[in-house]
Amino acid sequence: MVQQYGIKFALHLINKHFGNVVSKVCENLFRRGLLTLDQLIQYTQLTKDQVKNSLLVLIQHNCVQPFLLDDDDVNNLKVRTQYLALFDNIVHRLRFPKFLETVLLRLDEECVDILDGLLRDGRLTLKQMVDRASQGKENTVTTKVVRESLCKLLTARFVERCPAREPVVSTSFKETTIRKRGVKSAKIFETPKTLEQRVLEAAMPGDAIRFSLTADTVLNVDGEKKSDDVQMNSVEENVVEEEQILWRANFEEFIRHLRHKVLIENVRSQHDDGTATVLSAVLEATKTVEKNVKMENSVPLSLDTITTEVMKTDTGRALTIDRIKASLSQLGCSSSSVVDDLYSIDLKKIIEQARNEDVESIVLKRYGNDAYRMFRLLSKGSSFLDTDKIAACTLVESKKALKFLTQLWNDNYLHMETVPVVTGRRSSDIFWWKVNQPLLWINVLDEMYHAALNLSIKMADEQKKNEEVLNVPKHKLKEPGPLQKEYKRLLNVWLLLGSSLMKLDDALMLFHDF
Amino acid sequence: MSVLAGKRKRQELASSLSATLSNEERVVYNIIRGRKEMGIWQGDIKRETNIPDSLMKKSIKMLLAKTLIKEVVNIQNKSKKVLMAAEFEPSKEITGGEWYTEGKLDTQLIEALSDVCMKLILRQKVSTREGILDWIRKVGTEIFPGGVSAGQVEQILKVLVLENKVQEVNSTGFGDFASVPAGEVCYRLAKKTAVGVKVGAMASFPCGVCPRINACTPDGVISPTNCQYFEKWLDF
């Protein structure tokens, strides 16, 4: 569930990109949940056209998903489309530059141009991509060239087919159970999926279609025949159908890529380059078979497969098998944890460690060294500790310790319980403290959204305050003087605010998307 | 001196001294002495005796002058000094332990010992608690004239681990760990100490470390558009 500043930040982005009216529609979807068109008109007090157009814009840019709710009521003949705001996709708009950079590093400039079009316009057909690529150029760019780039993007899964228009989702849910055969088993309860997850799942086509270029999937991107029984369409029919397919950026793959990057960099800083190379090879080999982005453990691989993958890389060729084994051991794959000779790396642990470091960094800077030591003592353990014990372990005076612990508790960084103690005629309270990690991370994430909102507002404010300087012709700014000085200052301010926001966005992804 | 011998000596001292004390002084002295290393606050003595206040205060003054009793700062409540028979050493509950001097945390001792530990670990790459203790006993007597205990060294090392300056690891017996038997607990500099502690994204700009962030709102009294911390940060 998204906290208040997450929603405020998402709405700020919508407002900035699409204006007040669209933002108002989006706000009502966030605050009130799933709504029909009629409900939106009622709550926003906008005209029907305004609401409709806003929804079309939001759907075009993949910020809202329409769907039909099947309530299994045979008497209910009226089927109404409901709309779901997609928080994650809205916040992804902040990180479009990172997605473009990813494609630039892994593919080429032509692919970057296509992706840029998809990100700017939300969704495009092949024809629209060709038209866009040809704009401002003397010679028209051929469909073949654009198609080739699109194929590359599809193979890398950076682009996908747009989802079904209005998928049908059932209101009922069934408890999912898994039973092991032939063994005394207990029902394993899986957390039921949220309605948002079920809507997105229902909308998403299967992988074979999702990343397939051809309309009726006779031939997929790899050129393999899908089915001998399907009646072959004529080439012209295929081309027409192909040009009508809508494509969009596949945010999931970009987030997966960025998650892998963070995992590798964290391992590099904690251990060494060799271990980072081994992890990188494992993740690269298994990225297409990962079931979802937030995989807790890497897909199990044999040592032979890992060794083969490592030796494919430039930096991996220097590593011996013993060195690879030592790296796997550093990554937590000791001989006791290896099952059926398959190695699986605990990715969740690496992410959690990175999160802890970020939170500790905040505590150190905000509350000082003493509070930092006490916070680290509590976050390393899992049980409650009383004030005196914390003070003794961290060499902080008891009164000072109580003051810092109370500050941390007030700001929701610590959990506290009081236990009354009676000694003789006197009664007093003993305070017990603990770090409640899941709640702490939710709180820290909301603070991060708050900070991101502040940075964005400050950027807009600086732009507004200095509009005059920004509107001065460029040739006048080249002349030394107060105007040039002010312009340079503004550029530096802009750079600092922008880079801080991008760096903070890395932390947002660490706490929300990874 | 054995425990029994010590006890006998205290009893002999007590009986020889009690002959020189007035009745009130003797009563007060016996109450104080009865509390041994825990001592007793003046107000509590008053509750246990029927001696008038002025007479009690006079008796305490006399006992202090005769150095039969002493005042000790109570770490639990520094304004209420505790009275204790001279021959007893105050307990940890009263003094706060070996890190406290006169009721105050001895920050100079802590800093000096932390500094020595860090320098030794930096020089030797890997150090053990015993290694550091040995060095202090042989070479560090000028810095620590009163000496330091193994417990104090261990506690300082744990605090350095909490400060993320030092890592606690098990020796492999190879490479940097060659001087330490395999499996033994030892300490080395945390990687982050060498390259610099990583500052997280939130901690690198004003909002992330602002104590008022919960009061800050886009249109409020405290907002990003009028925030002084922001202005200062952007003041090139």
Image: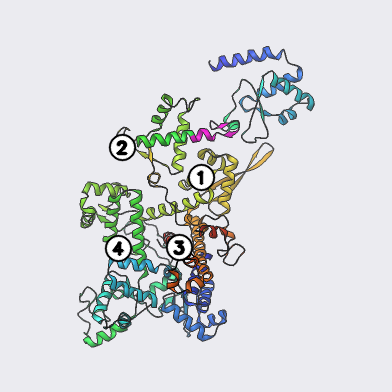
Is residue A68 visible in the rendered image? The answer is: no
Q: Does the magenta stretch include residue B100?
A: yes
Cα distance in 3D space between marks 2 and 4: 37 Å
Mark with earlier residue (4, 3) = 4
Q: Name the residue under label 4.
A: A287
Q: Where is residue B46 in the image (x, y as percent from the top left)?
A: 75, 29
Q: Where is residue A319 in the image (x, y as percent from the top left)?
A: 22, 50
* Closer to viewer: mark 2 or mark 4: 2
Looking at the image, the residue that sits furthest to the front is A480
Cα distance in 3D space between marks 1 and 3: 32 Å
Residue pictured at 53% horizontal, 65% vertical: A4
Q: Which of B156 and B76 is in front in this view?
A: B156
Residue pictured at 52% horizontal, 54% vertical: B209
Q: Mark 1 points at which residue?
A: A369
Classify mark 4: helix, strand or loop. helix
Amino acid, disc 4: Lys
Classify mark 1: helix, strand or loop. helix
Q: What stretch is highlighted in magenta?
A: B97-111
- The label on residue A502 is none
Q: Which of A466 and A427 is in front in this view?
A: A466
Q: Evaluate if marks 1 and 3 touch, with contact meaning CB atoms under 8 Å apart.
A: no
Q: In this view, does B174 lie to the left or right of B6?
A: left
Cα distance in 3D space between marks 1 and 2: 30 Å
A289 over B3 or under it: above or below:
below
Q: Evaluate if marks 1 and 2 touch, with contact meaning CB atoms under 8 Å apart.
A: no
- The label on residue B176 is 2
- The label on residue A492 is 3
Amino acid, disc 2: Asp
Amino acid, disc 1: Asn
Cα distance in 3D space between marks 4 and 3: 39 Å
Residue pictured at 32% horizontal, 54% vertical: A345
Q: Which chain carries label 3?
A: A
